[in-house]
Amino acid sequence: MSTSQTDVREIARAAMKSALAKGAKEAAATFSRSRNVSLEWRDGKVEKINEATTRGLTLQLYVDGRYSQVSSSDLRPEALDTFIADSISMTRVLSEDPFRSLPDPALYEGRASVDLQLEDPAYPTVTPDQRRKAAQQMEEAARAVKGAESILSVSTGFDDTRTESFRVASNGFEGTRVDTVFFVSASVSVKDADGRRPEDYSFGGSRFLGEVPAVSEVGRQAAERAISRLGAKKPPSAVMTLVIDNRAAGRLMGALGGPLSGASLQQKRSFLEGKLGQAVGSPLLDVVDDPLIPRAFGSRLYDGEGLAARKRPVFEKGVLRSYYIDTYYGKKLKMAPTSGGVSNLAWTLGAKPQAAILKDVGEGILVTSFLGGNSNGTTGDYSFGVQGFRVRGGERAEPVGEMNIAGNMLELLKKLTAVGNDPWPYSSMRTPTLVFEGVQLAGV
Amino acid sequence: MPEDRGMTRRKAMGLGAAALGSVAAYDILAGPARALASTGPGATSGIGYFARFGVTEKLIQATLGEALSSGGDFADVFFQHQVANTYLLEDGAVNRAFADVKLGVGVRVVKGDQTGYGFTEDLTPEGLRLAAKTAAAIATGPSRPAPARFHATGELPSRYAVKTRWEDVRPEAKLPLLRSVNEKAMGADPRLRKVRVYFVDESGAMLLADSNGQIVEDLQPMTTMGLTCIAEQDGRREENFHNVAARDDISYYSPDRVDRMVRECVKNTMILFEATPAPAGEMPVVLAAGSSGILLHEAIGHGMEADFNRKNVSIYSDKIGKPVAKPFVNIVDEGTQEHARGAINVDDEGTVAGKTMLVQDGVLTTYLHDKISAKHYGVAPTGSGRRESYQHAPMPRMRSTYMLPGPHKKDEIIASVKKGLYCTRFTNGQVQIGAGDFTFYVKNGFLIEDGKLTRPIKDVNIIGNGPKVLELVDMVSDDLAIDEGGWTCGKNGQSVPVSQGLPTVRVASITVGGSTSKS
């Protein structure tokens, strides 16, 4: 329970050495330990407190040209020994795979020498009382808004985590990472005249306790958002201009993650295959994958394989500039590895806040959240449930819901006509408000 | 498919996100590390399996004593051991495998409807003591004694006994299954470009003991196999997916079942080349028998989980005893189907899982209860208290959710629709528990024109409101089928395996999220 950081390193190194001694030609090991405290508060009292320190070990094994990845939380020495031996036996019966190897060690080099400021040294000082008070204040703020008499229930929460991890690979990689994260959230249910009980939420967080947004703001916003849903109606089906709220827009970008990956390209299941260097979106689609933003949620000095993290354009004035390629699929595709996954998305922002964008749009729909739906990464077809507000005369008007948008991602990206100045700070997607013209909306 | 990251983070942390539930057909994106299992004679009383980890009644007693040291009303301790193996075939070869072992214990203390929870991977007396002490902090008051003796509660069922436990099956015996699926699929149609096959076997064991002296162990096997087909025709590509899952052993993969899985996947991929975009707007929708049970999961199942109702935030909070559907609509959630993915002998609070009528003769009947909500409502728990792992406190969850057969015939139902949709395959769904709005994503379906199935459609989301849609279920066929797909239900950041089923059903009107205008 009280292993020090030295132990974190020793456990990973010992596991890697054990794998090599038992017959692995190459191996990598990652050990991580995480402490999380989560407090949920509801209607005047604590609902639940969850607190624990958890740990886990993951190994990548390269045995006789064959590959497996195995993990365990059972770290009793004799159990771990048997587990590694059994895992190597299991790997031996697989088919050989000439494309499997640890990364080229040259790609470990050049790790940025910056302080990403991911760990708040004040983490251990958070007290149970502090969490409780923050949660209570959020509820009080929620119940103080205009229209609070329609509130059925307020749930709030305070959540903090400190994670330390160490990765070692047999071809010369070592990396240590410690990060902290603090989140506060509030969720409010209200009673509508027709018996529906709409709920909405607000949340915010930071890697540093001192930068967590004011809890009174979070509580107030949650209540205002929920109350604003009262009387929501299903609109008529139409082709409309969509303004997608910065908090919601990450869902759209999420649908691009799969098709941008090496695995999807190699498996012929990406609608973005063969589009490198081509315009796939409007010139306003301008996004850099930036792993080096201080204090951001997706920041890192090296990725999951140990590749040194670098800033890389993904879309440049609408032109697709790079895919997410890991070592394995890079070899299969004969492409240079970039990184296996998204870090932070840094957008070239527009000049206007959302309110000014609504003025420009005049008539349309403001989408404030998505509900279900999916997209087909092979063809780019998407169909998502959405809710939000009508925009009339350049202003946010009545709430609308139980509606859906559908089309093809390639067409949609070309319809991007405005980008806000408001990147959503509580997600690594960091999406600003986005405007798309001429989207099919299904309602009545 | 990925969700927006901010939301995923919130859900993972279980922060205030009380009101979303979801289900998806394919959970492998979440990693190879899902559930795991071994097998045996059914749930048993006392310490059998967990003795190998040094678990004794004395240790449990000491843990519960610490858990009750600050005045909690109730405490339980949940031990879990899971071993999962996943094999993946890609580009013609089984060229990677994943193994995951989970060993840990969670301690819960309940005071009224408040919960304290702590967990650890360290099964030593000191590790357990610290977890219990953490959980105990939810309460303040004088300590209560731990039970001196432990006992079983009533008769324990056996719903997924197997001949061969997964830990006794060598990897070499599993790989031919994946290879045969690949060969059969690649041989089925020259337009196939890629086939991926995955296979998961899980040996899971749980032990639950509580401050009432109850003790129960259950061994929970699980297996899933699925394939993805990627095909190309005239420069256009399409992809589809099919999987099957059960709490069973390797004999589950009979030649018939494997052939059927391959045939369905290839057929449902190739038909996508003929599909036209779905219309947008309200229309009648007919749901095919089987996996259309996703409708019930989203439209009513989550809303009937008693925690949402205890908190007064479900759209069904004030509807018990009231008519919510036509009199021929009966909806069940239960854990008793032998070898079903959603079957459980006992839930993760040790309660024997039975059959719960959510809707009987059109009237809303019973919520799904765990021990906290059952106490709140003064009723017996329904055996619905489930958790993803030892890292989580249990909450009310679905098991296998389906509608009983009704008075109509499938052909009659399709013939009744002038212009609408017939939906056959689904990938995922989601619901807002309070507002009642829900969606499910249709991967395959057909247009119905003048009472006949005409052109295929694909990739369309359907969105409705739970109580409104239940009222609009106006025809139910006699052909109930329980789907055997690998459905996984998500709620507050916890995933659990579920089953679902439906007879052919007509919804008189619902919004279809197509990309072309209706007329």
Image: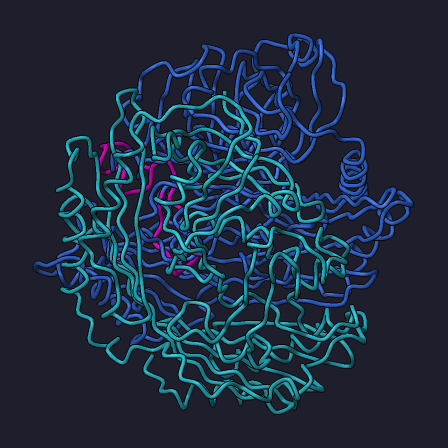
Chain colours: A cyan, B blue
- Residue A173 relative to residue B211: left or right: right
Indicate the position of residue A104 as horizontal and vertical percent values. Answer: 69, 85
Say above or below: B384 vs A397.
Answer: below
User: Is residue A188 found left or right of A86 in the rendered image?
Assistant: left
* Magenta residue span: B368-395
- Give the answer, above or below, for where A97 lies relative to B513: below
Of residues B286 and B198, the one drawn nearer to the viewer in this rendering: B286
Q: What is the chief secondary structure element of the magenta stretch?
A: loop
- Quarter holding the C terminus of chain B? top right
Residue B319 location in percent, x, y? 31, 21
Residue A287 is drawn in which quadrant?
A: bottom right
Residue A8: % across, % down = 43, 85
Q: How many marks?
A: 0
Residue B128 shows up from this direction: yes
Q: Residue at x 87, y 52 (%)?
A: B183
Which residue is at a point 74% across and 13% down the rendered structure image? B452
Within the magenta stretch, is there residue B372?
yes
In front here: B68 or A419?
Answer: A419
Horizontal side, residue B219 vs residue A189: left or right: right
Residue at horizontal 35%, vertical 53%? B14
Image position of B379 (left or right of A429): left
Residue B417 figure quarter: top right
A266, above or below B457, in the image = below
Q: x, y (%) of residue B425?
A: 66, 33
- The residue sitting at 47% across, 49% down in the picture is A249
